[in-house]
Image (tube, rainbow, N blue to C red):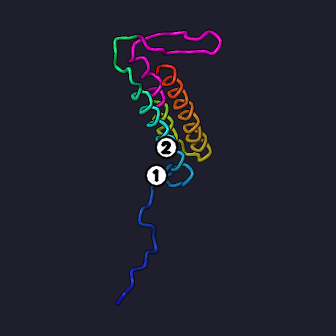
Amino acid sequence: MRRLQLTTPIITFRDPLLASPFLRWCTIVATALNLGAWIVILGIPSLPGPDAIVIHYTTTFGIDALGDWKDLLRLPVTGTVLLGANIVIARLLATEAASVLLITANVLIEFAVLLGSILLWQVNT
């Protein structure tokens, strides 16, 4: 009876962006943070409603801007656009250093988007 030997990995990535485990995990983490920002914003209990919602808040002046509930979607939409753009640009660039820079920046950007979403949720509840 012959034994099955796996000499090659079951899943191989031909894409240079996903071939590196570091870049792959950074992309997964950035996507999860972006998804978390969407969940937080869409989880605000007063959405959608006719009332004005706090769009911008500073510790110095307090509430700076009020707006419609659709204005809150700017933050996660911007995060999604930046995530997609950085991934596309990283795939188009041939150098690994530029790809690492863009994908690592994705994680930091999406962390800031999630933090901003949490703070907006906190102000509006």
Mark seen at residue 99: none
Q: Is residue 73 left or right of residue 26?
A: left
Towards the viewer: 25 or 47: 47
Looking at marks 1 and 2 on the same chain, the residue that comes earlier in the sequence is marked by 1
Find the magenta span and give its range: 52-79
Vertical position of residue 7 compared to residue 58: above or below: below
Q: Is residue 77 magenta?
A: yes
Q: Hey, which quadrant is residue 58 in on the image? A: top right
Q: Position of residue 18 (x, y in %)?
A: 49, 51
Between the residue at mark 1 and the residue at mark 2, the CA separation in whole angstroms equals 8 Å
Q: Which residue is mark 2?
A: 91
Q: Hey, which quadrant is residue 100 in on the image? A: top right
State which quarter of the image contains the N terminus: bottom left
Vertical position of residue 74 compared to residue 109: above or below: above
Residue that appears at 47% across and 40% down:
31
* Marks 1 and 2 close (CB-CB < 8 Å): yes
At mark 2, the secondary structure is: helix
Q: Is residue 121 left or right of residue 108?
A: left
Q: Position of residue 60 (x, y in %)?
A: 65, 12
Q: Is residue 49 magenta?
A: no
Towards the viewer: 99 or 62: 62
Q: Position of residue 96 (x, y in %)?
A: 59, 47
Vertical position of residue 39 compared to residue 93: above or below: above
Residue that appears at 57% across and 31% down:
112
Q: Which residue is mark 1?
A: 15
Residue that appears at 63% across and 15% down:
59
Amino acid of disc 1? Asp
Towards the viewer: 69 or 87: 69
At mark 1, the secondary structure is: loop
Which residue is farthest right? 60
